[in-house]
Image (tube, rainbow, N blue to C red):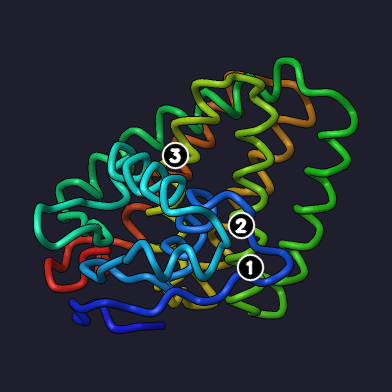
């Protein structure tokens, strides 16, 4: 992963066959994965080369991501990846706690069997990754598990808002190095939330998810509260 102190232009990775075709989605993915670090410039020509999008579409995408708080566009300097202060990250987690808690409640209320099967599969895979102490695999599965619950809320406002926040959240998680005991504690939360959703107990699902997000904030505090390491 590139140093957070690198302030200059970074070459955007060429799109793989699996990369999002939309330039805005592609850039979100690059920022989330840490291929574009805070403070690094994003040039129109590099995005055009990576995605095949026209200059007009790339400009629209850059403006859209600036509106979403992912990029910042400055006169005479162009676009760069926006850094978040520790206070902004705290605010992000406060919003995440509320929205993901509500998403868990809604998923428990009305999500059907296809989602239940998907949730069980993800939980089983996370159990295996946690038992093996496989940090990268657990982080990837963790992201999918949370996203599955958000999608199952069937609430477009939650889905859209979390899509924006998750660019920063995924970048934070990708920088974390959780100890085995922390992975197991997080997965214990996951098992409880999964159980509450499958049992269709909305109040329990919401309170457990909110507690889980608050605990994650405390676990990641050494990263989040260090100004020089702000994501």
Image coordinates of residue 57 in percent, x first then y, are 46, 46
Which element is circle 2 on?
helix
Q: Which residue is mark 2?
A: 142
Image quadrant in which the N terminus is located: bottom left
Which residue is labeled 3 in the image? 211
In space, the residues marked 2 and 1 are separated at their CA atoms by 6 Å
Quickly name the residue at label 1: 138
Of circles 1 and 3, which is in front? 1
- 92 displayed left or right of 116: left
Is 128 displayed left or right of 56 in the figure?
right
Give whichever of 159, 45 is nearer the camera: 45
State how far apart marks 1 and 3 are (Cα). Answer: 19 Å
- From the viewer's side, name the closer residue of 214 and 156: 156
Lower sequence index among marks 2 and 3 = 2
- Tag 3: Cα neighbours inside 10 Å, few (<14), some, or many (≥20)? some
Give the total number of marks visible in the rendering: 3
Q: Would you identify the image quadrant in which residue 36 lies?
A: bottom left
**Circle 3 — which element?**
helix
Which percent across, then down, holds residue 85? Answer: 15, 55
Q: Quadrant of residue 41?
A: bottom left
Decide: few, some or many residues near mark 1? Use Cα within 10 Å; few <14, some 14-19, many ≥20: many
Instruction: Give the x, y percent position of residue 113.
Output: 90, 29
Residue 72 horizontal side relative to residue 128, left or right = left
Q: Position of residue 117 (x, y in %)?
A: 88, 40
Mark toward the start of the polypeptide (1 vs 3): 1
Residue 193 vertical placement versus 41 (above, below)? above
Q: Give whichever of 58, 218 is nearer the camera.
A: 58
Q: Which residue occupies 18% across, 77% down?
A: 7
Is label 2 in contact with label 1 (beta carbons under 8 Å)? yes
């Amino acid at each position: 992963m590139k140093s957070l102190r690198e302030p200059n232009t970074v070459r955007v990775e060429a799109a793989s066959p699996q990369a999002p075709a939309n330039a805005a989605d592609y850039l979100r993915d690059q920022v989330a994965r840490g291929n574009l670090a805070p403070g690094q410039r994003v040039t129109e020509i590099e995005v055009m080369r990576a995605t095949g999008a026209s200059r007009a579409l790339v400009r629209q995408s850059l403006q859209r991501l600036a509106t979403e708080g992912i990029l910042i566009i400055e006169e005479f300097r162009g676009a760069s990846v926006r850094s978040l202060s520790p206070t902004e990250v705290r605010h992000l987690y406060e919003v995440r706690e509320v929205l993901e808690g509500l998403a868990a409640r809604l998923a428990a209320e009305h999500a059907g069997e296809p989602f239940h099967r998907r949730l069980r599969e993800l939980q089983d895979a996370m159990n295996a990754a946690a038992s093996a102490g496989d940090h990268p695999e657990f982080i990837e599965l963790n992201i999918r598990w949370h996203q599955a619950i958000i999608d199952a809320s069937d609430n477009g406002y939650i889905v859209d808002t979390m899509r924006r926040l998750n660019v920063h959240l995924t970048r934070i998680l990708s920088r974390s190095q959780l100890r085995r005991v922390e992975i197991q504690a997080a997965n214990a939360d996951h098992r409880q939330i999964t159980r509450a959703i499958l049992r269709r107990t909305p109040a329990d699902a919401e309170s457990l998810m909110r507690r889980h997000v608050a605990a994650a904030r405390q676990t990641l505090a050494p990263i989040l509260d260090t100004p020089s390491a702000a994501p």
